[in-house]
Structures are given as C-alpha cells and as structure tokens.
Amino acid sequence: MPDRHPDTTPDRHPDTTPDRHPDHNTPHLPDGHPRRALRLGVAGPVGTGKSSILATLCRELAGELAMAVVTNDIYTDEDARFLRSAGVLPTERIRAVETGACPHTAIRDDVSANLDAVEDLEEAYGPLDLVLVESGGDNLTATFSPALADAQLFCIDVAGGGDVARKGGPGITGADLLIINKTDLAPHVEVDVAAMVADASRARDGLPVLALSRHDPASVAQLTDWVRELLVRHRSGTHVPTDPGPMAPHSHSHSHDGS
Amino acid sequence: MAGLAHLLLGDGRLPVGAYTYSAGLEPAVAAGLTRDRIPALLRARLHTAAVTEAAAAVLALRAAGRDPVDYGPVQQALAARTPAAPLREASATLGRGVQRLARRLDPGHPAVAALSGIGPRPLRPVALGALGAVMRVTEEELARGVVYDELQTITSAALKLLPGDPLDSVVWILDAEPHAAAAVAEALAVRTPAGLPARTPPLTEQWALEHAQRERRLFLA
Ligand SMILES: Nc1nc2c(ncn2[C@@H]2O[C@H](COP(=O)(O)OP(=O)(O)OP(=O)(O)O)[C@@H](O)[C@H]2O)c(=O)[nH]1
Ligand SMILES: [Mg+2]
C-alpha cells in the first residue's frame, strides 16, 4: 500500500458508527468553508469507460488529494473489484452499494445507500478531498441527483457511434462535463471526433466537452485540471450543484425555453 | 394532518433506501424458493419477523412519547432477538435511511435527537418509532405500516428475482390480509421490551448468513 495514504483511522463498521454528524450532508459551513469532500459522479452508458476514468483519476490525483470511491452496480461489486484490482487506491477506500437491481433509483430517486457509503468513507478516512461515485452502467437517461453528487461527468464513447452526442438526454446536455471517450478508437469505428465534439457542444449550450483517451496524456491532463478547478470552486463555495435536468426523451439546446 | 402520514409510512417509494432490501426473499430464492411458494413465504414472515418488527416499532413509538426518550431497552431487546449479524446489519442500514428522513422532518424533535444517543445505529423499527412520533401516526397505523411494508418489500423484490405478472403481487397481498391483521394485533398487544416476541425462524437466519457470503447480490438481505 502506498505510504501516501496514512490510514490511521481504524476501519469502523457502519453498524457501530454513532451518527455524530447530523448535518454531515451540508456542503458548506455557515462561513462558506466546505466541511466535506467534493462528490463527483461519473455516469454514462454501459462500457463507455466510467471505471477506467475513475482509475485514471485515482492514479493521477491520489498523490495530491485524499480520495475514496463508491460504485453502483446492477450486481453488487463488479466495478469495485475492477478498481481494487487496478491498485490505484487502498482497497478499503473503494465501496460498492447494493442497488436492489435499481441503479437509476440509487443515484437519483432514493440516494440513501450512496449517502451512507460516502458518509462512512468520510467518517473512516476523512477529511477527504474527493469522493468519486460511479453509476451503474445504464442508458442515456441516468444522471445523479444533486442530493448525492456536487458535480457529474457524463461519459459516452466514440464506439457508441458519432450520433450519440446528437441524441441528447439530460446527461449529454446538462452534466458538468461531457466526456467523449476512447478517441484512440475513432479511426477504427469511422467516427469523426471533431464533428462529435462539435455536435455535443451545440447540444450543451457552452458547457464543456472533453475528447478523452487514456492513451492520450494531454487529454488526461485536461481531465485532471478540470477536476482540480472544480475542487477549488467547491472549496470556495462558488460551485453550485446543478441537476442536469428531467428525463426528457430528446432535447435540443435551442429548444424554445428562452423566456 | 390530513391522514397522509400513515400512507407515506407504507409507501415503497419513500426515499429511505428500502428498495435495497428484499425482506429475505433473495436469500430464500438462492436456497431454492420458487414463485408458487411466495404466498407461503409471506404468511411465514407475517407470523414471525413481521410481528417482532412491528411490535418493536410500537414500543419505540411509545418510548418516543416519554420524557426523557430512551430507546435503549427496545433497541437491546430487538438486537437480542435478531441473532444473525447480517440481519442486524441490514436493519441498521435501513434504520439509517429512516433516521435521515426523521432528521430532515424535525431535527430538534426529542424523539429524533434520542436516536443519536443509541450506541450502534438504531435498528429500523426503532428509527421507525421515532419517525412515527415525528409524523404523529398512531400505534396501530405504525404497526400496520411495518407489516404492510414487509409484504410490499417481498412482492416488489419478487418482480426482480422471480418475475411474473406484476398483478399477482396484489392478489398475494390481499390474500395475506387476515394474517397481516393478526400480526398487527399481536404487535399492539406487546407491553414491554422484555415481552417482545423472539420470532426469527432458524431457516431465515441460515439463509441470511449464506446470503452475506455471496458475491453477486442484488439486495442487502
Ligand atoms: N481503446 C480504449 N479503450 C478504453 C478506454 N477507456 C476504457 N476502455 C475500455 O473500455 C471497456 C469498458 O471500460 P470500463 O471502464 O469498464 O467501462 P464502464 O463504463 O465502467 O463499464 P460498466 O461499468 O460495465 O458500465 C474496457 O475494455 C476498457 O479497457 C480508452 O480510453 N481507450
Ligand atoms: Mg464500470
């Protein structure tokens, strides 16, 4: 285990941890100073690379930030096991929650199980800077409730086809950052990354889009810089958690909502 | 109140994390339970776990009405009657969601504040007693809510684990009504924590212990 993670706090069982922090979920103290970690959600369709992004973020940032991970799976702990075996974070800082076969519910309609996991990690290893929460791989409509995630990445990939970005959905149009992943595969699937980024940018009304490949260090650096900047805003109290929006079947940024 | 609180208590969509629980169905299915045996499982739960849970919730609601509020005796009595550790843990996890809701509704309420004083986390029926006090439901409404929730939990989980016509669930629940009424009556008749019935069937415990060892689970317990 790398020594940059001095886990001095014994691993306490949730069952025996008294609830001493009634307002643990409050992001900021009255003076605006954050009392808890930034919670960053990572959502997106199955297999687009969410776990790999978590692994990348842990690998790149765990040296400078105190981090932990919560995964949501249809089956309990596939993602958690993948991340533990990646060796990017001490295994006990990676927790999986049971989602009762309802991964959508667990990150949006009823976030109890995820809040429990995040709070337990903060209690055991805190103070933490960053907690990453991976959604159960699902479709284009699943996004995090702001009651759970302060900010969220939505991840699609070039292998899903160049049209995905145009299809929209709340994650694509409203997530804090849209990632178009696996750009290294673009030539093999005949997708024009620049066009995909342009489509996505149009759908997002100026919200950022990042073309990412774990084989492209410059893109990885852009991702980590975005997270660092977000953390600065979270700490200064200037970042406002935003819901990406309702589960609309299809929406365009230039829809007629400008009143 | 306009009589909505007790409906909320029995609402499976109440956002307190209950969708992660199958009230023993997933462990039972792993042990070979088939869809045609679900009504029998419902009856079995109504004669066992549901009585203990509902009675404990009623005792906690009564404790919540006293000054000072002390949940210690009912929490201990319930823990002692829940010998399988995974079942205690599941109850504490579910209780935590209920506690979060109670705190949101009325953080300063003595019934809510007293939950924090419980060493290990409050078990679900204890937290439900506090929530019941905050929502001002009657003992009978609370007991019926707990019993109904048991039925609804199992039948909802069945849609995931032993799929079939969703309308069957309604038939099963209505057919179980006399047993549910008996469970409510029995729960209300319990006067003291010492008198809390110990009703965890050994098979349920065995299945819960096996479930906790499994890797690919959908539900807590
Ligand atoms: N070529 C390429 N493959 C990648 C990249 N990122 C991830 N992958 C591969 O994509 C596949 C899926 O990656 P995961 O990170 O497991 O995707 P996920 O979204 O977490 O998947 P689920 O949790 O099952 O929904 C794996 O085979 C990864 O190796 C990338 O940048 N380039
Ligand atoms: Mg994954």
Image: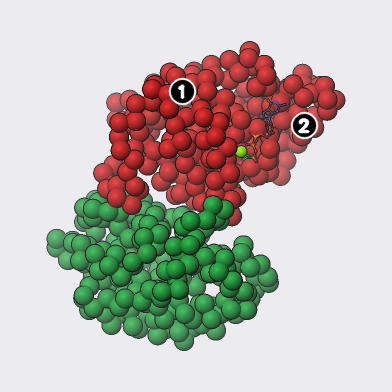
Chain colours: A red, B green
Q: Are marks 1 and 2 on the same chain?
A: yes
Residue holding disc 1: A62
* Front in this rendered view, residue B28 or A155: B28
Q: How many marks?
A: 2
* Front in this rendered view, residue A62 or A161: A62
Q: Is residue A227 above or below residue B143?
A: above
Residue holding disc 2: A159
Name the quadrant of the N terminus of chain B: bottom left
Tell me how far mark 1 sits from mark 2, CA to CA. 29 Å
Q: Is residue B167 above or below residue B115?
A: below
User: What amino acid type should be assigned to the residue bearing mark 2?
Assistant: Ala
User: Which chain letter matches label 2?
Assistant: A
The structure residue drawn at horizontal position 73% and vertical position 40%, both measured from the top left corner, is A250
**Residue A107 badge:** none
Q: Is residue B163 visible?
A: yes
User: What amino acid type should be assigned to the residue bearing mark 1?
Assistant: Ala
The picture places residue B166, in percent across and down from the top left corner, at 65, 70
User: Which chain letter matches label 1?
Assistant: A
Q: Quadrant of residue A67?
A: top left
Q: Residue furthest left?
A: B68
Q: Is residue A20 above or below residue A212?
A: below
Q: Is residue B137 above or below residue A252?
A: below
The structure residue drawn at horizontal position 41% and vertical position 81%, both measured from the top left corner, is B47
The structure residue drawn at horizontal position 72% and vertical position 30%, both measured from the top left corner, is A157
Q: Quadrant of residue A119?
A: top left
Camera-near label (1 vs 2) is 1
The structure residue drawn at horizontal position 36% and vertical position 60%, both measured from the top left corner, is B85
